[in-house]
């Protein structure tokens, strides 16, 4: 029994030591979204200020993400609309300055694809969401000699579930998320 317990502790230590911190390279990453406007077109935007970290091994297997996005940094290429989105009608950035996400589960669905489930908190409301993911590849950056991983995450959330904006025919309820990440191993 003592030998089994020692073996398990050693294996746990090896597994933990194989994990490392990866951080998003914000210059080569984008947290984007799209929403229907007037039921006929789509408005796209992104958040420019975010911090995304993950714990993962060298193959970026089973990443555990922590995400913080500054709501003030919303950008739809229209200053008037952006200011309205920052107001109490939508994100209330003074009261809710951050959108956060924390991984709760990871499931590999193919050779380079996976489902990432986590707790998403927006506007003071936390809901479980699942994102579809694709690992585009891993390379050793020639300048930094560090591993870099490229990923794409997509999914859809209902803004009304997070009490963002009211029910209106002017904009859709569903928001499509597209997150392109370049993660650098630290």
Image (spheres, rainbow, N blue to C red):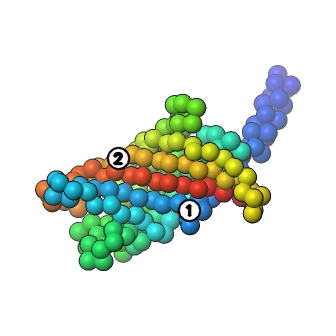
Residue in the image at 41% along x and 55% along y? 121
Q: Quadrant of the C terminus?
A: bottom right
Is residue 38 shown to the viewer in this render? yes
Q: Which residue is mark 1?
A: 28
Task: Measuring from the top left, give residue 154's x and y in whole percent.
Answer: 42, 47
Count how many numbered circles sit on residues in the image.
2
114 to the left or right of 42 = right
Identify the secondary structure beneath mark 2: strand
Q: Is residue 69 above or below residue 159?
A: below
Tell me the residue that label 2 is attached to: 156
- Dot 2: few (<14), some (14–19), or many (≥20) neighbours within 10 Å? some
On the rendered image, what quadrant is the N terminus found in?
A: top right
What residue is shown at x 23% (from left), y 52% (from top)?
Answer: 173
Residue 74 position, x and y percent, is 38, 69
Q: Quadrant of residue 95?
A: bottom left
- Point 59% across, 50% down: residue: 150
The residue sitting at the right extreme is: 3
Where, by quadrant of the figure, is residue 8 drawn? top right
- Spatial separation of the CA atoms under disc 1 and disc 2: 22 Å
Q: Is residue 62 above or below residue 54?
A: above
Crowding at dot 1, Cα within 10 Å, few <14 / some 14-19 / many 20+, comes out as few
Front-most of 167 and 110?
110
The nearer-to-camera label among 1 and 2 is 1
Q: Residue furthest top?
A: 1
Q: Position of residue 25 (x, y in %)?
A: 60, 62
For image coordinates 58% across by 32% down, the residue present is: 111
Q: Position of residue 53 (x, y in %)?
A: 59, 56
């Amino acid at each position: 029994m003592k030998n089994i317990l020692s073996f398990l502790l050693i294996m746990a230590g090896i597994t933990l030591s194989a994990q490392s911190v990866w951080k998003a390279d914000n210059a080569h990453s984008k947290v984007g979204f799209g929403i229907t406007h007037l039921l006929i077109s789509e408005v796209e935007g992104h958040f420019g200020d975010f911090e995304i970290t993950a714990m993962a091994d060298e193959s970026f297997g089973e990443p555990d993400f922590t995400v913080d996005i500054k709501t003030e940094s919303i950008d739809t290429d229209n200053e008037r609309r952006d200011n309205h989105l920052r107001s109490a009608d939508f994100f209330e950035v003074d009261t809710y300055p951050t959108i956060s996400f924390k991984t709760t589960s990871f499931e590999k669905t193919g050779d380079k694809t996976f489902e990432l489930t986590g707790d998403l908190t927006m506007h003071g409301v936390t809901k479980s969401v699942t994102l579809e993911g694709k690992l585009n590849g891993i390379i050793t950056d020639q300048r930094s000699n560090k591993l870099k991983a490229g990923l794409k995450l997509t999914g859809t959330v209902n803004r009304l579930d997070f009490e963002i904006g009211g029910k209106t025919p002017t904009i859709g309820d569903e928001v499509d998320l597209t997150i392109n990440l370049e993660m650098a191993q630290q």
